[in-house]
Image (spheres, rainbow, N blue to C red):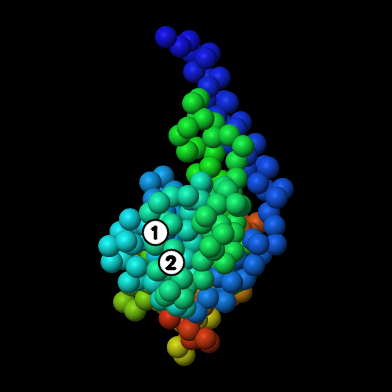
């Protein structure tokens, strides 16, 4: 029975082995990596990742990462490739074949067919002298000295090395394509990040009958009733279809400091004329920053379509997509 200390030592040793392997690989990134990144960037077809067993799982993950970051990609199990799935490959494609030994029978068996199709082949292997490396157009070396497995048998450091090589390719391609957060969000519309980066002010703003609107000459009794009824935290002061000022709950609180004169005041006496506004096409995240990243935070913004006032947006609406 292992002691607690021994269990921790085994785990730490595996971490160390894999980290050391990655550091060693990092220092040996070669011109072939640059060629692979530029070749994929210029690819007119798609990038097909293939592997078997553990490397198949890594290939699937790399393909998913590429697809979600702007590179058209698909995964093909090497065994299934022998039974018809090679049909998804065409001559404009790039095939990245992952095999640590470079001698996997299933991968070796499909390479001749891939070459006949005319696709460009990149080998991602830990053995640059392997059969796979020799028949490929380009080789990415993922060699590790040891696996980290207590028996040095189960793929551990080698699969991590291949995975990080794939991540490095995806990251470089993102930069080469000038891939933006908005691009990323387009491929992830269902997640919180997608909502955050795709939602615009116009999708969240209040408009029309929801708004509390008054005139410059409106009295405080009307302003207070509108503020209470609409529950938006703002009354919009309009003149000839133009927003000439806004009254917030803060404006009312400040006016109440002189409560003996409060009800003799007009909207024009307490409204804010130099208000902060935002365009309807702005991202929701930009509106949130505009409200929060300032000496005195605000809770609501008038929304404009060019020069026309069309609604308001509240911080309460924005935090839902934060």
Q: Residues within 10 Å of mark 1 (few under 14, many from 20)?
A: some
Looking at the rendering, which quadrant does residue 176 occupy? bottom right
Give the residue drawn at x 49%, y 62%. 96
Residue 86 location, x and y as percent?
34, 68
Tag 1 and tag 2, C-beta contact below 8 Å: yes
Q: Secondary structure at mark 2?
A: helix
From this view, report whether residue 18 is shown above or below residue 253. Answer: above
Q: Nearer the viewer, residue 185 or 99?
A: 99
Q: Which mark is residue 112?
A: 2
From this view, report whether residue 72 is shown above or below residue 3. Answer: below
Q: In the figure, is residue 306 to the left or right of 232?
A: right
Distance Cα–Cα, label 1 vs label 2:
7 Å
Q: Nearer the viewer, residue 17 or 214?
A: 17
Q: Nearer the viewer, residue 288 or 307?
A: 288
Q: Is residue 163 visible?
A: no
Q: Is residue 1 visible?
A: yes
Residue 36 location, x and y as percent?
60, 65
Residue 313 location, x and y as percent?
44, 68
Query: Disc 1 designates what residue?
Result: 109
């Amino acid at each position: 029975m292992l002691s607690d200390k021994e269990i921790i030592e085994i785990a730490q040793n595996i971490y160390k082995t894999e980290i050391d392997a990655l550091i060693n690989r990092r220092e040996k990134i070669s011109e072939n990596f640059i060629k692979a990144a530029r070749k994929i960037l210029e690819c007119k077809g798609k990038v097909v990742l293939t592997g078997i067993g553990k490397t198949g799982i890594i290939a699937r993950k790399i393909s998913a990462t590429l697809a979600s970051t702007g590179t058209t990609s698909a995964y093909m199990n090497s065994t299934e490739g022998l039974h018809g799935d090679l049909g998804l490959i065409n001559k404009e494609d790039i095939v990245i074949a992952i095999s640590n030994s470079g001698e996997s029978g299933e991968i070796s068996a499909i390479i001749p067919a891939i070459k006949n199709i005319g696709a460009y082949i990149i080998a991602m292997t830990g053995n640059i002298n392997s059969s796979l490396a020799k028949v490929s157009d380009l080789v990415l070396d993922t060699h590790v000295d040891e696996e980290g497995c207590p028996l040095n048998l189960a793929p551990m450091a080698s699969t991590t090395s291949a995975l990080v090589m794939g991540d490095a390719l995806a990251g470089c391609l993102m930069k080469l394509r000038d891939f933006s957060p908005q691009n990323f969000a387009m491929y992830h519309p269902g997640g919180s990040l997608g909502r955050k980066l795709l939602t615009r002010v116009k999708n969240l703003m209040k408009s029309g009958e929801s708004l509390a609107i008054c005139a410059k000459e409106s009295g405080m009794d009307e302003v207070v009733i509108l503020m209470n009824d609409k529950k938006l935290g703002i009354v919009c002061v309009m003149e000839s279809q133009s927003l000439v000022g806004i009254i917030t709950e803060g404006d009312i609180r400040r006016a109440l400091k002189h409560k003996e004169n409060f009800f003799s005041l007009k909207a024009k006496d307490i409204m804010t004329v130099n208000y902060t506004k935002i365009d309807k096409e702005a991202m929701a995240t930009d509106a949130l920053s505009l409200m929060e990243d300032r000496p005195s935070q605000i809770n609501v913004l008038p929304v404009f379509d060019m020069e026309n006032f069309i609604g308001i947006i509240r911080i309460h609406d924005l935090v839902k997509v934060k």
